[in-house]
Amino acid sequence: MKGIINKRRLPVGMQNFEQIRSGGYMYVDKTDFVWQIANDKQNNFLSRPRRFGKSLLTSTLACYLEGKKELFHGLKIMELEQHLPQEEQWPQRHVFRFDFSGYNTAIELKSYINTVISRWEEVYGRDKADENLQNRFLTLMEKAHKATGHQVAVLVDEYDSPLQHTLFKEKEHEALADIYRSFFPAMKTGSEHLKCLFLTGVTKFTQLSLFSTLNNVSILSTLPQYATVCGITHQEMVDNFLPELKAMGEANGWSVEQTVDKLRDMYDGYHFSENLDENTAVYNPYSLINALDTKRISNYWASSGGSTLLSELLERVEVEKDTLEGSTVSRDRLEMADVSLQDVPLFLYQCGYLTIKECDEDEYTLGIPNKEVQRALYNIVLPNALNQPYSTVDSNLLDIKRDLKHLDVESAMRRLQQLVAETPYAHNSKEYINEERYRYLLRIAFYLMGCTIEEERHVATGIIDLVVKHPACILVMELKLDNNGGLQAAKDQLADRSYASAYRAEKKPLYAIAVELSSSKRGITAWDIQAVK
């Protein structure tokens, strides 16, 4: 009972700063960023992937701008606030808050904005003759400024959610865009009444003209000084959650160091600026907090939803290996461009499936940030590439994994043949399917089975196509298309170059597998399995 009473409270899925602070929940102090946002530029926009703390940041900013000083005792912002003149410290401003998530049509969004404005008009009054949302909100800003003696703040969380959900519905998308164009100019017209405008979202839609209309919106998304505004850095994790790290380790038989390494591999690795050192990498906060709370490594981000838009995109655009690993985008495009269904790497970056891995003065190189995202992405990519339902693919993978556990490699190969049978052509290649694409699909399949994969492994005698390390065995695979020598060529290469010998020291059952692939039938047509002594 004593352990339960003394257990620290983790803010699992919580997005309300006041609730976290009043309820005694753990809070990673980001209030120095909050102070900077509120007191630097007037108009600000921050993009981050879903479940990355944007709503909590918005809530924290609202509490500060409302002057709720009692919630911030002991936090960084207390010292920063002292840099302001006495009369400007902790003013109680009126904060107009909007949350656009969950509204997918123009009618729904307009009704929501009208409802919020009407609620505030009950406080400040309304000119009944004017039905225009922009005019009504402008009047509210003016009245609130006059009533409180302080400029107001406008915070719009997930501003792009309705636009994202209608990307494939042209008429509805344009109707929504009209709502945005008719409402947001109030912030420009009423700029004299506005202390701070803060927009959050996943993607940027410059075609709405918001970012030019609103007088020089400061795009915080890739600025180095805001790289860690959302998410949790490695040092923040260690400083704030050491008791939870110890408890998680004890529950799983790991040392603290092992626990940290597992969490890092699974949830760390996001970079949102040109600074790529360890201090600017962040963990997905939603996943990390859930893992520490449950004491289990799992795929929390993927299970929280949000993949519908990506699935719809993949029905139209093929995601190849080069799209996921090592794709490059110009700095201007990543920092300033809209969401684009034709620009898949940029879209995947904005949605959190890719992150910045390298950069130079002209371009960014993107890649998958961590194991959680890799599994989430592959679970969408593979069924789409195979043109099969997720449930079918998942069931087949479990069967293959079970066969390998029992060293029934022949059965595993038969199931693998069924899995990739009649693999569709890539969208960008109507005439043939090549060996590299097969290798890409097989690598994803084995990864989703929990295997460690080595692709195009260089050894003294050559380059091995695919090495699959299952907990029960190791598969050394050579792939050949039927028009490139086929099965015999694959067998000869495995034998002549003794590829499997490089893995004898691992003391697991070892198999050399020659695989013939068909470009015409699009599938695995033959194989030869040799147990290596």
Image: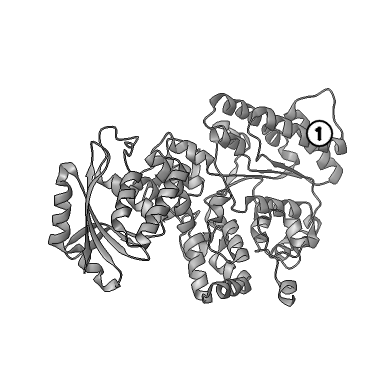
Circle 1 crowding by C-alpha within 10 Å: few under 14, some 14–19, many from 20: some
- Give the residue drawn at x 38%, y 47%: 328
Vertical order, 373 against 172 (above or below): below
Q: Can residue 366 be seen here?
A: no
- Give the residue drawn at x 21%, y 69%: 533
Q: Can residue 58 be seen here?
A: yes
Relative depth, front residue between 109 and 151: 109
Looking at the image, how many numbered discs can be counted on the residues? 1
Relative depth, front residue between 91 and 344: 344
Question: Is 102 displayed left or right of 273 in the figure?
Answer: right
Question: Is 373 displayed left or right of 414 in the figure?
Answer: right
- What's the coloring here? one colour
Could you say where residue 145 lies in the image, as x and y percent from the top left? 81, 42
Which picture quadrant has residue 474?
bottom left
Could you say where residue 386 lies in the image, as x and y percent from the top left? 37, 41
Question: Is 230 displayed left or right of 491 in the figure?
Answer: right
- Give the residue drawn at x 17%, y 64%: 498
- Give the residue drawn at x 46%, y 44%: 390
In the picture of the structure, the residue carrying the numbered disc 1 is 118
Could you say where residue 241 lies in the image, as x and y percent from the top left? 62, 70
Relative depth, front residue between 25 and 328: 25
Relative depth, front residue between 305 and 261: 305
Could you say where residue 511 lies in the image, as x and y percent from the top left? 25, 62
Question: Looking at the rendering, in which quadrant would you find the N terminus?
Answer: bottom right
Q: Check disc 1 and give the amino acid type.
A: Ser
Question: Is 20 displayed left or right of 280 in the figure?
Answer: right
Q: Secondary structure at mark 1?
A: helix
